[in-house]
């Protein structure tokens, strides 16, 4: 399955794009997404440790199972306020 | 009112939204852009949001606050875009029958916004610009 992943703030700048595409096996987890991004997008790799993942506007754990229908985003450390 | 907005926050107008005839206490917090950070002279701050998720998270936060404390009104607003020194970037306000509840709920609201709502600020200072180091994990 081909996932579209939204990037924001420092990740958007590091990646040079507002969205990236990542191909994963059907039924892949957030952990697999992290591994794929680290491998395919070296510019993002150093940020991933502190980054959370959101699916359909909610934070999800590394065990969460992804699908192409979900809106997926990488959430680097937030700094609102 | 729960909002992520590019419009300036009119503090008097949003405070007025909290008034309720049974409320004995209104507590508000306004986070404003200050002119210094880590020894640097700040010129402006630019806020970027994952707007749909920020709105959803703030609406969920308001529901959680209503469930946890007896509140009459909750107002949560965050600005996006470029703000100047002194501008209000965030507003949290609650009204309740008594002050203890209002102080606790307001404090909780701003802390959750700072840790859990997908909004980021980039600081423009004399000599450069940089993303502000933020909150990576739950507090």
Image (tube, coloured by chain):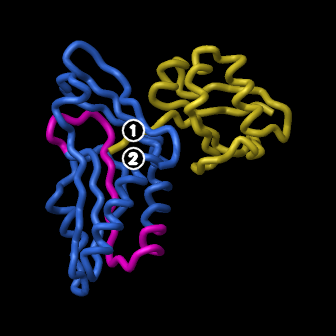
Residue at image location 77% in from the left, 39% down from the top: A29
Q: Quick check: B48 left or right of B85?
A: right
Marks 1 and 2 on same chain: no
Residue at image location 51% in from the left, 18% down from the top: A14
Name the quarter where the N terminus of chain B is drawn.
bottom left
Q: Is residue A29 above or below residue A47?
A: below
Q: Position of residue A40 (x, y in %)?
A: 70, 17
Q: Is residue B69 above or below residue B4?
A: below
Q: Which residue is mark 2?
A: B114
Q: The magenta stretch spans which residues?
A: B63-87
CA–CA distance between discs 1 and 2?
Answer: 6 Å
* Residue B7 drawn in magenta: no
Q: Quadrant of residue A70?
A: top right
Crowd rating for badge 1 (residues with CA inside 10 Å; few <14, some 14–19, many 20+): many
Residue at the right extreme, as displayed: A26
Label ID, residue A79: 1
Is the residue under label 2 in contact with that under label 1 (CB below 8 Å)? yes
Q: Position of residue B97 (x, y in %)?
A: 27, 82
Of the pair A68 and B12, the residue shown nearer to us: B12
Colour given to chain A in the rendered image: yellow
Q: Quadrant of residue B36?
A: top left
Question: What is the secondary structure assignment of the residue under circle 1?
Answer: loop
Colour given to chain B in the rendered image: blue
Of the pair B48 and B121, the residue shown nearer to us: B121
Q: Position of residue B52 (x, y in %)?
A: 49, 48
Question: What is the secondary structure assignment of the residue under circle 2?
Answer: helix
Residue at image location 27% in from the left, 55% down from the top: B91
Q: Is residue B49 above or below residue A45?
A: below
Q: Is residue A29 above or below residue A42?
A: below
Q: Chain ID for label 2?
A: B
């Amino acid at each position: 399955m081909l996932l579209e992943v939204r990037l924001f703030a420092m990740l958007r700048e590091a990646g040079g794009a507002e969205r990236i595409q990542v191909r994963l096996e059907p039924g892949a987890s957030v952990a697999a997404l992290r591994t794929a991004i680290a491998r395919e997008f070296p510019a993002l790799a150093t940020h991933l440790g502190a980054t959370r993942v959101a699916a359909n506007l909610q934070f999800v754990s590394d065990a969460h199972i992804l699908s192409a229908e979900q809106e997926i985003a990488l959430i680097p450390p937030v700094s609102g306020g | 009112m729960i909002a992520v907005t590019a419009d300036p926050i009119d503090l008097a107008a949003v405070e007025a939204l909290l008034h309720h005839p049974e409320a004995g206490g209104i507590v508000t917090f306004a986070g404003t852009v200050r002119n210094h950070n880590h020894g640097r002279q700040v010129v402006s701050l630019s806020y970027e949001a994952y707007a749909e998720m920020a709105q959803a998270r703030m609406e969920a936060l308001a529901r959680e606050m209503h469930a946890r404390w007896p509140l009459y009104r909750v107002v949560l607003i965050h600005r996006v875009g470029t703000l100047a020194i002194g501008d209000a970037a965030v507003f949290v306000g609650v009204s309740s029958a008594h002050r203890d509840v209002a102080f606790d709920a307001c404090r909780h609201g701003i802390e959750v916004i700072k840790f859990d709502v997908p909004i980021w600020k980039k600081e423009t200072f004399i000599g450069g610009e940089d993303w502000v180091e933020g909150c990576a994990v739950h507090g």
